[in-house]
Amino acid sequence: MKYLRVKDFNLKTTLDCGQTFSWTREDEGYVNADIGQVVYVEQCKDRLYYETSTGAVDLRKILRLDDPIEEINSELLKDDFMSQCINYSQGLRIVSDSFYTCLVSFLISSWSNIPRIKKHMSDIREIYGPKYELREKNYHGMPAPEVLSGVSIAELKRLGLAWRSEFIVESTKAILDGEVSEESLGELEYEEAHKKLQSLHGVGAKVADCVSLFALGFLEAFPIDVWIDRVIQEHYGIFTATGKSYFRKSKAAREYFGQYAGYAQEYIYHYTRNTS
């Protein structure tokens, strides 16, 4: 296998912290088939060993290995609680998932949990996605919007997606109609992109923040779910003192943590989810 050297990076922490549904645990590493081919990655100390099905893959970009992590952590180190979160989350990086995969996975996340989201995404891949082969094993990737646009709401409901089926179908149609695109969103400032994402059917403020952070690379995005909301109320009264709306809490978090608020969110989520 090929390899690349890494510094201050932990593959398991990064891929198991709940931010991505593109990577699946396999053998000693992880597999991702949502990038137009399949890639297998495993870590041994300061090396990432990887193998691909067809060609080169930019792991440095996908895993954000070049993020200035020392600068990020230094800027976020504002209080004792965040110090605990950072120390526990050593090696974590915000991923850079494909836009459409990220969007669909977080549309599915509404009133769900991680195992169920993974199951739904796996079903969609196996039924509608392209097939790849690596090391004599078959993998299915995420279907393109053009493919999933041919799937009806009723078909998706039969997979157990319930009302989320309509979210997927309508958002896919809007993307194919050019109402929203990854390219155009990337040209906007965070707040404009966040607002534009919410024009998609079923995309609320939290899903828009997840896509902004994990696919579009807006590191200031601070997704707030029930878990994060509970934690910030306990440790950061400043977030709720400004008001109860998602917008006000998110704005307060971004003002407090700054340009790397998304890293703060993921540190908090990973730490509290595993220690509470």
Image (spheres, grey):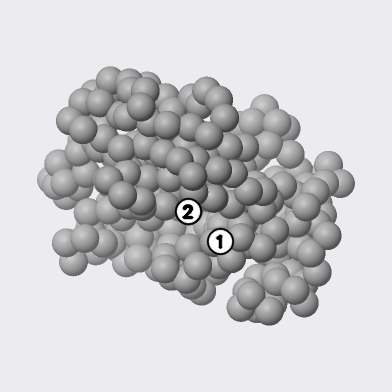
Percent x, y of residue 109 = 52, 65
Dividing the picture into quadrants, the one containing residue 9 is: top left
Classify 14 as above or below 17. Answer: above
Residue at position x 72%, y 47% in the image: 144
Task: Tell me if I can see residue 74 in this picture.
Answer: no
Percent x, y of residue 101 = 60, 49
Count residues near mark 1 (Cα–Cα under 10 Å), then give few for <14, some for 14-19, many for 20+: some
Q: In front here: 132 or 21?
A: 132
Q: In front here: 246 or 169?
A: 169
Classify 170 as above or below 61. Answer: below
Percent x, y of residue 98 = 58, 40
Q: Secondary structure at mark 2?
A: loop
Query: For mark 1, what is the residue?
Result: 121
Residue at position x 17%, y 30% in the image: 45
Query: For mark 2, what is the residue?
Result: 21
Residue type, mark 2 in image: Phe
